[in-house]
Amino acid sequence: MSQNRDGFTSTFGVLVATLGSAVGLGNIWKFPYLTGTNGGASFLVVYLLATLLVALPVMMTEIMLGRASRANAVTAFEKLAPKNQKFWTVIGYMGLVSAILILAFYTGVAGWVFAYIFKSLSGSIHSTDPATAKAAFDAMVSNPMQALFWQWVVLGGAGVIIMLGVSKGIEAVAKKLMPLLFLLLVLLCIRSLTLPGAMAGVEFLFAPDFSKITAPVVLTAVGLAFFKLSIGMGTMLTYGSYFRQEQNIPATATRVMLADLSVSMLAGLAIFPAVFAFGFEPSAGPSLVFMTIPAVFASMPLGNVFMAIFFVLAAIAATGAILSILEVPVAMMSERFGFSRKLATLISVGIIGLFGVPAMLSSSLTADWKLFGLNAFDLFDFISSNILLPLGGILICLFVGWVYGLPQLKKQLSNEGQLNNGLLINAVFVLVRYVTPIIITVIMLRGLGLF
Ligand code: TRP
């Protein structure tokens, strides 16, 4: 089957498509709101450490496993593990669960972004007043029909794009958007940083108060690092399976990490100065971006137009990420069960839509459905980001460090000796064999309050 798998058509295309998966609501929405609720600068420091020591090595090895096996996340481990070690395919199945849980809320938030495109144009969110902004956001999320309608628009759209196939669908969408989104974020930053009182936001983002770091905060940072780089559940593995043989995996992963980080930092710098300038609450939670971004645009000329463009770009970025997550169940069902891509897409979208209902009604009809004190929206996020992705990361590290082994890793990451990166590979090996799995295990146990 591997000969006729669709693939990315150029080295640059690979970079852009991988970025298209990494950059999304994780950068624009989740990173700012979690930084806001978890103490600002100190959270940022932990997040940076988690990205370098934990997420980056996992990202490299995950992409590598995909390219080495040229298969979906379940078949990959069947192909690469010794015959008597079927156990490792559990990583792929966990990824299937994560994909569904993540998309159940992610497509909903993407739906809010779509809704905000129209609200920008109508002028109904054109305000710098925190109370007005909150009322507009609450009106949207607490209206069950609105919340569900937009989620279904997103799911339907993503399904159609996925059915068109990997290189055409994903590459075409991802390629065009990145530079524009980047530019608009820069513009937002400039406006936000020049607002009176902006410095308090800069301080919030860069002057750490380390007393705010607790075990759950650290776990959240690790979860966010996984979420933002799309790792721990087979997305990067699946993407890796479409990588060209001559692609430099460590370099690509590092570039994607850096680009992803800069988009997040820009989002942070666009949002926090404005939060303090206008008197928003940094710890507002999931609504933070939807209240603050309109306020920044409202304080610039042609604000409505720029705001609509911003939300269009954010919607496209979110769609790129959604496609990459959807690709996991679709590739798995079509390659393992022989379903057509169309059928696999329909089934996936249907299941996600079902899980999406309680998640998106968490501010209205299902607000009282709680488990461990979390509503469905928060619960799906917590289980996927803070448990399943890091757990997937541990297993990927253990697989590469103890089963796959150094000789194979060297062969793969050096492109059969063509790249001169032996030192780096040794470092990655030590990290994934010992350091990363131990760090994640300790953080998970402490973060979940298990010891
Ligand atoms: N990284 C994307 C974002 O930040 C979301 C995403 C895409 C993702 N693929 C993933 C998250 C796989 C977890 C796992 O928006």
Image (cartoon, rainbow, N blue to C red):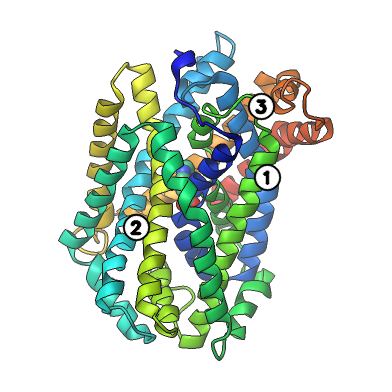
Q: Where in the figure is residue 75, as x and y percent of width and height?
A: 47, 19
Q: Is residue 102 left or right of residue 51?
A: left
Which residue occupies 47% across, 73% down? Answer: 283
Spatial CA distance of label 1 from label 3 is: 16 Å
Q: Amino acid at mark 2?
A: Val
For the residues carrying marks 3 and 2, which lies nearer the camera in this image?
Answer: 3
| Nearer to us in this view, 432 or 278 | 278
Q: Is residue 220 above or below residue 165?
A: below
Residue projecting furthest to the left: 145
User: Which numbered tag is attached to residue 254?
Assistant: 1
Q: Nearer the viewer, mark 1 or mark 3?
A: 3
Near mark 1 (Cα within 10 A), the count class, few <14, some 14-19 or many ≥20, is: some
Identity, as a three-letter code, of the amino acid under mark 3: Glu
Q: Which mark is residue 109?
A: 2
> Which comes sooner in the sequence, label 2 or label 1?
2
> For the view shown, which residue lies furthest in the top direction?
83
How many other residues sit within 10 Å of disc 3, few (<14), some (14-19) or many (≥20)?
Answer: few
Query: SS at mark 2?
Result: helix
The residue carrying mark 3 is 246
Above or below, 407 against 225 in this view is: above
Q: Is residue 184 left or right of residue 330?
A: right
